[in-house]
Image (spheres, coloured by chain):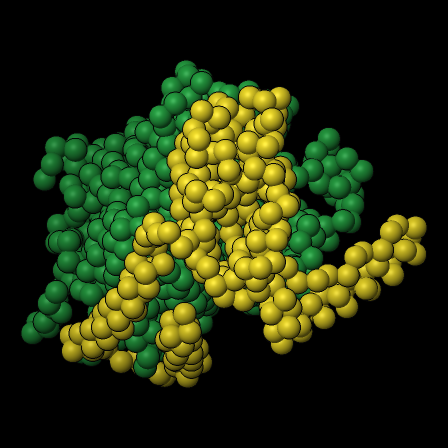
């Protein structure tokens, strides 16, 4: 990205400078005559070939990276997690010990008195050990393969800190994979994050003063957390469809997972 | 000569008795139709800009009640606080109106109609009747779109892109009921209007050029309008098909775009469809559409910069080749709007490749504009300033397209304010500048009077500063991860430190909105009280300035001028004047520039 930005910043500076400079320098005055200069094939060649080469370079580099990111190979080490989008919240479903998500479809949602939160097919044994949660925990350093589903309309799973985004399409399972390499704690110590949190809390503090003065309750101070937000227009509360993501050590993750209920336990 | 042209030739002595209705309302004269398009487009633009100011107020001060909301939005703003659904409706209709009604019909409709016959040397469009019908269909579609604002459950609110299932299911969003139906009806009629217009433009350019007006002597405006019309004919029908399939899913129980949906407590019956199909069909038009918006503006810019620089446009052949290359490439890049739609990533690779290719002809055009200015004798009037401004915003916006067109980089900025910044600069502002430049430049041709120059300068400078003020900061908040189409950013403390930037953007937007009132005042006032124009106020080479100031059917008394040279003999050595109109014969020994 920085290469792209460097190139476009350079082109922007040069072209805008020339554009504005020429507009100023050649502004008309009485007695002046313009130069009758209608074309120059060599010049056209130069400023066609140079962009071609530059863009070809950017394309090749970009495509290599794209293929790398988007090629999701099923493997035993990866954690498989379903992100389930609906108007207006998120749920996550872990594949459990067997590493396989049970079949699911919206037509199973009404089974089990509304306890089947993501519509797991109870006849598929793979689903019994699935774990459905509303707060996503991820062990650091382990690849996670997200399988996305939507219950109703298009949503998009946007996780800006991981540079990850993929639409959730009703009737289709989409996927995206990455390996988180920093825990939430580590991020909270990162100097850039510390600075951002500080400036946000300063704003919240000022805002709280106003709120308290008018009889409202103060705002909670902000602590950094990884985020999952919806990024495809999905209706009235599109602006508030979020889920917290916590990246932690494998021990902490295992401990948290042990406390969750499997699907089999939920539908008992 | 074709029979159509021969027939119209015979008409020139024939002055039909005109009533008010046949002259001003159901006119078949291209000059009157162009003014009708312009005025309707400007009216819709006022509504579109007003909407943007409303939602900008909401974004800058999200918890603040506003009296103006209560007044304008009524039940949609209880106690002066905007309802989230109507926020989405405002951004939807804003986008729809600006892209289609203002920048497609208002730009192409106005200038293609005004200039094609006059610049190619024809008495009128190939079919005055179809031309009239195409305007009135446009007017009808505008009326229906505005009517949709007053529907009980609200207008369409699924974004101007109206992706299903959100746009298909009233249970998902109230605006997806009658509001959406009216939107679809309006757009279907709009598409019909656009197709009829395009057919007329294409046939007229091919068949009705005057003697000597070969394709390589055509002004770049005509090349632009002609190629734009071809793109339109190829791509608008696909949007119509998407709209028809959506209508069928909504009203006739089909499942083209819908499958496996549970909403409002029930499983819907739809099976087997895919929203991604809709996205493909929509963007197959959607991408060429932005070039349908932009190419006329670029053509207008070529014309205006050459005329007011008193210099030939640099690289005429390259400019024509770029227009053709852009047109062709625009039909094979649509997937760059869908990199993270869930489509096969291999498609993403293909579209990245084609998208970055389209940067090349665009770059060539920009370089040619800049070189035209070099060593020119620049008359910096409002039309010229807006044209130069267009080149500036086109470059800025176009360069960020290189980030967005790269699928890998797009993952992080798709559907954020980075995209909003990009398309507003490269399309919204650039094409709008093209519209303004065209109006300032051809106002004397349309109305026989000049617009006020000083008001024009005021309009330009305030708009230019504010346009960058509104959209440049959006690059930063987009990179910071702020999604678009969010009613408020206060649901995420993470975005609290972007609030000040939002306020800054809104302030610039309000000032920019106010500056447009200067333009409107200038436009209306000058129509009646502007200084009367002379025959060729800009000392321009193109044929429209040889037609008399007073409008009448048939454009020229007597024979249509014949053409002997291209349109860009400005400051040609060997001539006393710094311009040589196209109809002037070559002097003894003079050579024509070969193209």
Name the residue located 24 percent from the left edge and 75 percent from the top edge.
A50
- Residue B474, percent from left and from top: 55, 61
According to the rendering, which colour does chain B have? green
Q: Is residue A144 above or below residue B255?
A: below
**Left or right: A73 with respect to A190?**
left
Q: Which chain is yellow?
A: A
For the residue pair A258 and B144, the one nearer the viewer reads as A258
For the residue pair A219 and B36, the one nearer the viewer reads as A219
**Left or right: B107 with respect to B201?**
right
- Residue B104, percent from left and from top: 40, 44
- Residue A142, percent from left and from top: 46, 59
Name the residue located 64 percent from the left edge and 73 percent from the top edge.
A189
Q: Is residue B387 above or below residue B447?
A: below
**Left or right: A257 with respect to A39?**
right
**Left or right: A143 with respect to B125?**
right
For the residue pair B581 and B180, the one nearer the viewer reads as B180
The image quarter in which residue B67 lies = top right
- Residue A130, percent from left and from top: 51, 38
Q: Is residue A87 above or below residue B390?
A: above
């Amino acid at each position: 990205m920085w290469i792209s930005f460097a190139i476009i910043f350079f082109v922007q500076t040069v072209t805008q400078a020339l554009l504005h400079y020429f507009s100023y320098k050649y502004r008309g005055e009485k007695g002046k005559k313009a130069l009758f200069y209608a074309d120059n094939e060599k010049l056209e060649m130069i400023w066609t070939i140079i962009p071609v080469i530059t863009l070809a370079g950017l394309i090749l580099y970009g495509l290599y990276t794209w293929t790398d990111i988007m090629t999701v190979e099923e493997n035993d080490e990866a954690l498989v997690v379903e992100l389930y989008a609906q108007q207006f919240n998120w749920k996550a479903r872990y594949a459990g010990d067997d590493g396989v998500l049970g079949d699911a479809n919206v037509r199973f949602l009404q089974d089990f008195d509304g306890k089947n939160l993501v519509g797991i097919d109870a006849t598929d044994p793979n689903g019994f050990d699935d774990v459905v949660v509303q707060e996503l925990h991820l062990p650091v350093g382990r690849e996670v393969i997200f399988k996305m589903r939507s219950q109703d309309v298009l949503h998009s799973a946007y996780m800006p800190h991981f540079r990850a985004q993929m639409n959730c399409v009703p009737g289709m399972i989409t996927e995206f994979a990455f390996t988180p390499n920093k825990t939430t704690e580590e991020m909270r110590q990162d100097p850039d994050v510390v600075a951002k949190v500080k400036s946000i809390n300063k704003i919240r503090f000022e805002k709280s003063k106003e709120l308290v003065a008018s009889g409202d309750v103060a705002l909670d101070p902000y602590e950094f957390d990884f985020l999952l937000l919806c990024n495809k227009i999905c209706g009235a509360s599109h602006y508030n469809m979020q889920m917290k993501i916590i990246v932690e050590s494998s021990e902490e993750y295992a401990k948290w997972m042990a406390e969750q209920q499997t699907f089999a336990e939920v539908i008992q | 000569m074709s029979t159509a042209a021969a027939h119209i030739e015979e008409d020139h002595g024939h002055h039909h008795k005109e009533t008010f209705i046949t002259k001003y309302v159901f006119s078949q004269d291209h000059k009157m139709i162009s003014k009708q398009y312009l005025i309707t487009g400007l009216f819709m633009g006022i509504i579109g800009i007003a909407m943007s100011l409303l939602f900008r107020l909401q974004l800058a001060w999200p918890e603040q009640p506003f009296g103006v909301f209560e007044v304008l939005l009524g039940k949609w703003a209880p106690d002066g606080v905007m309802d989230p659904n109507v926020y989405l409706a405002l951004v939807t209709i804003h986008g729809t109106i600006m892209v289609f009604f203002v920048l497609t019909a208002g730009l192409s409709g106005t200038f293609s109609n005004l200039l094609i016959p006059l610049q190619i040397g024809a008495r009128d469009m190939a079919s005055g009747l179809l031309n009239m019908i195409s305007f009135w269909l446009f007017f009808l579609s505008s009326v229906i779109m505005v009517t949709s604002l007053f529907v009980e459950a609200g207008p369409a609110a699924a974004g101007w892109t109206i992706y299903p299932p959100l746009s298909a299911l009233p249970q998902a969003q109230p605006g997806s009921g009658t509001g959406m139906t009216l939107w679809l009806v309006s757009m279907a009629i709009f598409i019909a209007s656009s197709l009829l217009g395009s057919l007329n433009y294409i046939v007229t350019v091919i068949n009705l050029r005057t003697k000597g007006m070969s394709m390589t002597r055509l002004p770049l405006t005509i090349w632009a309008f002609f190629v734009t019309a071809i793109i339109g004919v190829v791509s608008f029908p696909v949007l119509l098909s998407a709209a028809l399939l959506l209508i069928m899913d909504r009203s006739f129980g089909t499942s083209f775009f819908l499958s496996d949906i549970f909403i409002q407590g029930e499983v819907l019956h739809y099976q087997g469809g895919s929203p991604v199909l809709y996205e493909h069909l929509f963007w197959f038009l959607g991408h060429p559409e932005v070039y349908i918006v932009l190419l006329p503006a670029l053509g207008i810019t070529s014309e205006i910069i050459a005329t007011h620089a008193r210099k030939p446009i640099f690289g005429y052949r390259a400019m024509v080749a770029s227009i053709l290359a852009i047109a062709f490439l625009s039909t094979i890049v649509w997937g760059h709007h869908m990199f993270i739609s869930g489509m096969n990533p291999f498609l993403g690779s293909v579209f990245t490749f084609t998208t970055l290719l389209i940067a090349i002809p665009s770059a060539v055009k920009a370089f040619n504009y800049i070189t035209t200015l070099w060593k020119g004798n620049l008359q910096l009037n409002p039309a010229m300033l807006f044209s130069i401004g267009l080149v500036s915003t086109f470059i800025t916006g176009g360069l960020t397209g290189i980030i967005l067109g790269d699928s890998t980089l797009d993952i992080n900025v798709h559907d954020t304010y980075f995209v909003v910044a990009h398309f507003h600069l490269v399309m919204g502002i650039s094409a709008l500048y093209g519209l303004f430049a065209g109006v300032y430049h051809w106002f004397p041709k349309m109305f026989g009077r000049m617009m006020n120059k000083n008001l024009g300068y005021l309009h330009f400078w305030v708009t230019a500063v504010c346009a960058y003020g509104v959209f440049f900061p959006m690059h930063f908040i987009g990179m910071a991860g702020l999604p678009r189409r969010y009613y408020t950013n206060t649901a995420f403390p993470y975005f609290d430190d972007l609030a000040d930037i939002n306020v800054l953007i809104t302030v610039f937007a309000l000032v920019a909105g106010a500056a447009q009132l200067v333009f409107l005042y200038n436009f209306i006032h000058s129509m009646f009280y502007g200084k009367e124009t002379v025959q060729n106020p800009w000392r321009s080479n193109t044929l429209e300035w040889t037609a008399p100031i007073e409008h009448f059917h048939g454009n020229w008394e007597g024979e249509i001028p014949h053409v002997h040279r291209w349109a860009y003999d400005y400051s040609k050595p060997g001539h006393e004047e710094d311009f040589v109109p196209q109809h002037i014969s070559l002097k003894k020994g003079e050579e024509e520039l070969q193209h």
